[in-house]
Image: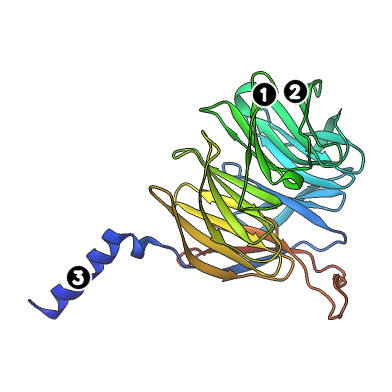
Amino acid sequence: MTKKRVVVLFLLALAATGFAADPAYRFLKAIPVGGEGGWDYLSVDAVARRLYVSHATKVVVIDMDKDEVVGEITDLPGVHGFALAPELGLGFASNGRENKASIIDLKTLKTIAKAETGENPDCILYVPGRREVYTFNGRGQSATVFEAMTGKVIATIPLGGKPEFAVYDPAADRIYNNIETKSTVVAIDAKTHTVAAEWPLAPGEEASGLAIDLKSRRLFIVAGNKLMVAMDAASGKVVTTVPTGDGTDACVYDPGTGLAMASAGEGFVTIARYEAPDKLTVLQTLATARGARTMTLDPKTHKIYLSAAEYEEAPAPRPKMKPGSFKVMVYGPAKAS
């Protein structure tokens, strides 16, 4: 057998195991945004190629093909999240400081109306089949449901603790939501607007980020005790865990690559592959930046986007942000540009 044939067979063997398909993520670029104030969620419209980034009292709009700021949505006091209804041409912002959610025209980036919510709305979620919007209210310990087109409140769902991120499963017609203060996950029936089930996250504690693999019906949950937890969405059974970093906040799942990722404020992203039957394998610990805790995914390019800033060197536990240094950092597979 020739040396060349041996090399070819070796590469084929690697591909068969999936090893060669595992993308090594790397830093691609930083998109300067500037301005002052804190930040929270980022949201992607993969079709329109727009990235929506919450920042203080506005949402910054970025063209993902040009990697540049193209607009902003204002009058969003204490904005946390931004949900998208592309088929309606609408977006929805959760305004934590005014206990309201804004309904936005995506063409003009102007507010059409505001819906009343519970106290301190944080995560916000659009349910396409029902044309309903959910806000998950931190201090209100509840979820508010309103009509996407009108802002009319349909229901208020008591949750018994502080809610964090949420995802929708159309096959089950359920919304899954982390309850941080109880270290549980609730399953909300989208038809009845009631909590259908509640499951402990143990060994995970104080959950924040949440993602779902709709094919296997697995929930990926990041917990405050440095864990990513995989849970069966049908039974609530915790099937496996992997370690993450300190200050873990966001979680995304990429159905195109089978990768689950968790971002940590201490400055890295844990990248793990979900493998049948119930196995998570950590493939990479990707260095990012201190404070880069919120993250989203573009399923088209497989790139991830994290909000970040530069900080003054100081011994204080909460170092001061350098003025005008706010940015979005872009990471992707080695072949991405």
Residue 327 horizontal/vertical position (percent): 74, 64
Q: Residues within 10 Å of mark 3 (few under 14, many from 20)?
A: few
Q: Name the residue under label 2.
A: 149
Q: On the rendered structure, is 220 left or right of 98?
A: left
Taking 5 as reference, is 40 above or below it?
Answer: above
Q: Name the residue under label 1.
A: 131
Q: On the rendered structure, is 71 left or right of 216?
A: right
Residue at 70% across, 23% down: 194
Task: Give the residue type that dot 2 points to.
Answer: Met
| Closer-to-camera residue (296/325) | 296
Q: On the rendered structure, is 191 left or right of 120?
A: left
Mark 2 or 3 closer to N-term?
Answer: 3
What is the quadrant of residue 113 in the picture?
top right
Q: Quick check: can you spot residue 52?
A: no
| Closer-to-camera residue (192/11) | 192
Disc 1 element: loop
Mark 1 or 3 closer to N-term?
Answer: 3
Q: Residues within 10 Å of mark 2 (few under 14, many from 20)?
A: some
Residue 319 horizontal/vertical position (percent): 85, 73
Distance from Cα at disc 1 to Cα at disc 3: 52 Å
Disc 2 element: loop
Residue at 77% across, 24% down: 146
Q: Name the residue under label 3.
A: 8
Task: Give the residue type that dot 3 points to.
Answer: Val
Residue 210 horizontal/vertical position (percent): 62, 46
Verify CB contact (< 8 Å) between mark 2 and mark 1: yes
Distance from Cα at disc 2 to Cα at disc 1: 8 Å
Mark 2 or 1 closer to N-term?
Answer: 1
